[in-house]
Image (tube, rainbow, N blue to C red):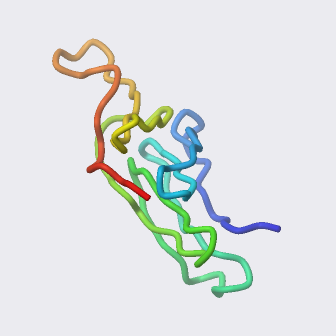
């Protein structure tokens, strides 16, 4: 069964990645820029509806309610996601040779069950 569709493929190093279960039991995914999405939930929305976003983000999908939402946006190309024991979400990115860009960025407030 397809739960979500419409993730962009314009820029192959920026597509949805880093799928991980959050401490709240929801799956999360990241995306870099300049990929665009118009995410729909098959069977629940018409093809022209959905959530549109272009750029860097982390999204969350509530499996029980089937709600898709943008959890946070910004940073560099989001590559990989990881939660720590306190419920903070971290992501790697391709900051390159820029000073003060860290390999891991804390990108959210703590999430708990």
Q: Nearer the viewer, residue 52 or 89?
A: 89
Q: Nearer the viewer, residue 102 or 5?
A: 102
Using the image as rendered, state which of residue 75 and residue 22 is in the foreground: 22
Question: In the current view of this chain or complex, which residue is farthest to the top?
Answer: 97
Residue at the far right in the pictured view: 1
Where residue 61 appears, as percent x and y from the top left, is: 55, 64
Q: Horizontal and vertical percent for residue 93?
A: 39, 28
Residue at (57% x, 48% y) in the render: 21
Q: Position of residue 13 (x, y in %)?
A: 55, 33
Q: Pick whichever, 79 or 61, lies toward us.
A: 61
Rendering quarter of residue 96? top left
Pick the quarter of the image with the C terminus: bottom left
Q: Position of residue 36 (x, y in %)?
A: 49, 56
To which quarter of the image does residue 75 belong?
Answer: top left
Q: Residue at x 30, y 42 (%)?
A: 107
Where 73 sits versus 95, above or below? below
Q: Residue at x 54, y 77 (%)?
A: 50
Q: Quadrant of residue 48?
A: bottom right
Q: As displayed, is residue 7 above or below residue 49?
A: above
């Amino acid at each position: 069964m397809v739960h979500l569709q419409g993730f962009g493929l314009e820029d192959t190093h920026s597509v949805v990645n880093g799928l991980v279960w959050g401490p709240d039991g929801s799956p999360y995914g990241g995306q870099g820029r300049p990929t665009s999405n118009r995410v729909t939930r098959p069977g629940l929305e018409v093809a022209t509806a959905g959530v549109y976003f272009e750029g860097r983000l982390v999204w969350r999908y509530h499996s029980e309610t089937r709600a898709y939402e943008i959890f946070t946006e910004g940073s560099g190309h989001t590559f990989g996601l990881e939660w720590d024991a306190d419920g903070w979400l971290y992501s790697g990115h391709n900051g390159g040779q820029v000073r003060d860009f860290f390999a891991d960025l804390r990108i959210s407030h703590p999430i708990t069950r």
